[in-house]
């Protein structure tokens, strides 16, 4: 499928990403060309003034949502995807660990599927981070598959996805927590029989700056426990995402 002109919205959450945001916007715009409707940067009033860099770019297809009183990855993506106007909505991190050039690989599958998820664990996918960190991610994803009982889906913590806009209206992203929102959303999609496919991609290290999860072992362990408990709560509660 060749995406229609002005059909794609890309949501990029940011917090202290001034060293990455210009390249993230530029590479996204270059990759999508005429099919790009808008890039929505959701910035939580970054102390490093990432929002100022976005303003100075004066890109007519880039829309800044500067949040003064809200914080968090999940809520940023929830706000950004709700504001998106494109026929297809994509979201990804702005640290460039996920290549913006892979966006079209996902969108091209939305003629047949309602959701396409970038996956490190299907054939052709790869996690190129440090082997121990990649191993821990694989273990958690295996744990999630077992607890939630969906063995045909592999990358529950991808955070890289494209969806038809009407699908996101039916199954919106939860604003709660950090990356756990993705587990909850995928589970809700699967339970509601949404047509979903995993598309292989190579996940790597951020281009610049320090990871908000990998850079501190205490933060990483705390988030891991939150993820594990959230998975159990999701299974106990069922497929209805948090409001």
Image: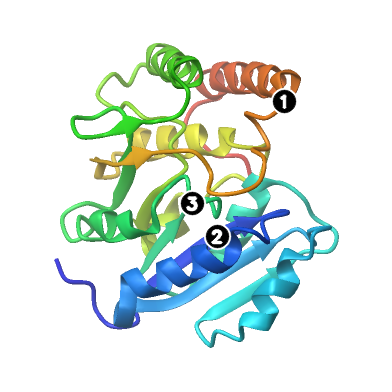
> Which percent across, then down, holds residue 112?
16, 55
Report the coloring of the rendering. rainbow
Label 3, residues with CA under 10 Å away: few <14, some 14-19, many ≥20: some
- Which residue, given by chain and number where applicable, does mark 1 sit on? 216
Q: Nearer the viewer, residue 221 or 47?
A: 47
For marks 3 and 2, the one nearer the N-term is 2
Sequence order check: which comes first, mark 2 or mark 1? 2
Q: Secondary structure at mark 2?
A: strand
Please report contact status of discs 2 and 1: CB closer than 8 Å, yes or no.
Answer: no
Residue toward you, 49 or 19: 19
Q: Earlier in the sequence, mark 1 or mark 3?
A: 3
Give coordinates of residue 151: x percent, y percent: 28, 18
Left or right: residue 34 compared with residue 169: left
Q: Which residue is mark 2?
A: 12
The residue shown at (56%, 70%) is 40
Name the residue nearer the viewer: 211 or 104: 211
The answer for how far apart the CA atoms under marks 2 and 1 are is 23 Å
Instruction: Using the image, tell me which numbered label, if any, was put on residue 174.
Output: none
Q: Secondary structure at mark 3?
A: loop
Give the CA separation, mark 1 to mark 3. Answer: 20 Å
Whether residue 116 is visible to the viewer of this picture, yes or no, is yes
For disc 3, the marked residue is 96
Does dot 1 land on a helix, a strand or a loop? loop
Residue 212 in the image: state x and y as whole percent. Answer: 68, 37
């Amino acid at each position: 499928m060749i995406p229609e002109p002005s059909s794609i919205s890309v949501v990029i959450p940011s917090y202290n990403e001034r060293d990455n945001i210009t390249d993230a916007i530029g590479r996204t715009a270059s990759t999508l060309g005429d099919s790009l409707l808008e890039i929505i940067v959701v910035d939580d009033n970054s102390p490093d003034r990432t929002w100022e860099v976005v303003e100075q770019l004066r890109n007519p297809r880039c829309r800044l949502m500067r949040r003064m009183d809200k914080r968090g990855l999940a809520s940023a993506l929830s706000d950004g995807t709700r504001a998106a106007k494109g026929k297809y909505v994509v979201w990804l991190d702005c640290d460039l660990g996920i290549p913006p050039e892979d966006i079209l690989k996902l969108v091209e599958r939305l003629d047949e599927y309602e959701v396409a998820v970038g996956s490190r664990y299907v054939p052709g996918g790869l996690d190129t981070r440090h082997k121990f960190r990649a191993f821990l991610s694989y273990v958690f994803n295996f744990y999630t598959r077992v607890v939630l009982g969906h063995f045909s889906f592999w990358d529950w913590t991808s955070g890289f996805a494209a969806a038809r806009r009407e699908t996101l209206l039916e199954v919106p992203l939860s604003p709660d927590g950090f990356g756990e929102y993705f587990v909850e959303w995928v589970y809700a999609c699967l339970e509601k029989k949404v047509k979903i496919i995993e598309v292989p991609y190579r996940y790597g290290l951020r281009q610049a700056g320090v990871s908000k999860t990998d850079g501190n072992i205490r933060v990483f362990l705390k988030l891991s426990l939150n993820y594990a408990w959230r998975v159990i709560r999701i299974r106990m509660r069922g497929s209805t995402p948090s409001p």
